[in-house]
Amino acid sequence: DSSSTTTFSSTAANQFNVRAAGGTRIFSNSGATLGAQLLANATSWSALSDRNAKKDFAPVDGREVLRKLDEVPVQSWRYKWDEAGSTPHLGPIAQEFKAAFYPGRDDKSISTLEFDGVELAAIQGLHSLVKEKDAKITALERRLAEIEAKLNRLVK
């Protein structure tokens, strides 16, 4: 890569470094159509999410996703090889997450695409609940105001 004169070298033994000013793509199929990419100047990987690459669309009940997510424990933990005293990780265990949302898939890992979809559906389910509660609170406030008005008329 001759896009820069900045010194670029490994900082640790057995380290793999890439400098690609135009971005990086890693394909996971023989047709070079599936994989992930790190766009130029990006700081996180992008995964294919194009509508044209998808099929079998079906609605998702956000409240049901929220209910299932509530049953998946979120814990702090360390990998067995992490040093004592190292900063713990925070999140679910793959086996429990996959049993709730993706039974039958690899239960040793969670992809960001799987996790993001569950999170977004749960947020939508939570938003639905909040709207419902807001409507109920508004109705109760209206009813309370009516009762207070009647009470004030009786007291006077």
Image: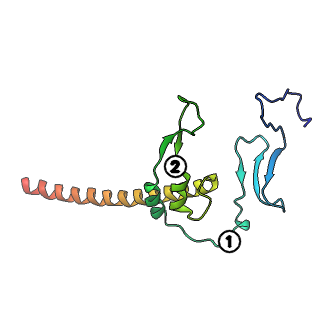
Q: Pinpoint residue 58: horizontal percent, then vertical percent.
A: 58, 71
Question: Label 2, on which residue?
Answer: 92
Looking at the image, residue 151 sits to the left or right of residue 91; the answer is left
Residue name at image x 45 percent, y 62 percent: 63
Above or below residue 7? Residue 48 is: below
Going by the numbered disc 1, the residue's amino acid type is Lys
Question: Label 1, on which residue?
Answer: 55
- Disc 1, SS: loop
Answer few, some or many: residues within 10 Å of disc 2's Cα (few below 14, many 20 plus, some between 14 and 19).
some
- Residues tagged 1 and 2 counted as in contact (Cβ below 8 A): no
Residue name at image x 59 percent, y 34 percent: 82
Camera-side residue: 69 or 150?
69
Going by the numbered disc 2, the residue's amino acid type is Pro
- Disc 2, SS: loop
Residue name at image x 80 percent, y 50 percent: 25
Q: Pinpoint residue 80: horizontal percent, then vertical percent.
A: 57, 39
Q: Pinpoint residue 97: horizontal percent, then vertical percent.
A: 53, 56
Mark identifier at residue 68: none
Of mark 1 and mark 2, the one earlier in the sequence is 1
Looking at the image, residue 129 sits to the left or right of residue 106; the answer is left
Q: Pinpoint residue 24: horizontal percent, then vertical percent.
A: 81, 46
Mark whose residue sits in front, 1 or 2: 2
- As measured in the structure, the alpha-carbon distance from the residue carrying label 1 to the one carrying label 2 is 28 Å
Residue placed furthest toward the right:
2
Q: Quadrant of the N terminus?
A: top right
Answer few, some or many: residues within 10 Å of disc 1's Cα (few below 14, many 20 plus, some between 14 and 19).
few
Residue 28 placement: quadrant: bottom right
